[in-house]
Image: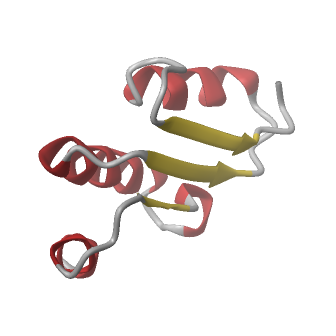
Amino acid sequence: AMLRDAVKMGASVVGGCPDLDPDPTGYAEAVLEIAAEHGCPVDLHTDGDDPARLGRLAAMAGGLRAGVTLGPCAGL
């Protein structure tokens, strides 16, 4: 709810650190959904060192495309 409110108040980019949430996948899905609803770029930070997990995160984001930033991705 807070992220949606932030976008309504003028935030132009959505994101965060999924690794800090108890449900990293759910967090990433929520951020990506809100970004899609509002046409915002996405910036997700992960220190993950599992290349398969990072690949899944990139796939959830619709691939590595303009408007999506994943970093620092030490596992890649």
From the viewer's perspective, is 60 left or right of 44? left
User: Residue at 61% across / 58% down in the picture?
Assistant: 19
Q: Which one is in front, 71 or 47?
A: 71
Q: Which one is in front, 26 or 46?
A: 46
How is the rendered protein coloured?
Answer: secondary structure
16 to 30, vertically: above or below = below
Give the mark count: 0
Which percent across, then down, holds residue 51?
Answer: 74, 23
Q: Which one is in front, 41 or 15?
A: 41
50 to 23, vertically: above or below = above
Which percent across, then down, holds residue 56?
Answer: 51, 24
User: Residue at 83% across / 31% down in the picture?
Assistant: 75
User: Residue at 21% across / 82% down in the picture?
Assistant: 9
67 to 22, vertically: above or below = above
Q: Which quadrant would the C terminus be assigned to in this image?
A: top right
From the viewer's perspective, is 24 left or right of 73? left
User: Residue at 38% across / 57% down in the picture?
Assistant: 27
Q: Which quadrant would the N terminus be assigned to in this image?
A: bottom left
Residue 62 location, quadrant: top left
Which percent across, then down, holds residue 40?
Answer: 31, 49
Residue 6 location, quadrant: bottom left
From the viewer's perspective, is 52 left or right of 75? left
Which percent across, then down, holds residue 55?
Answer: 60, 20
Q: Which one is in front, 55 or 22?
A: 55
71 to 15, vertically: above or below = above
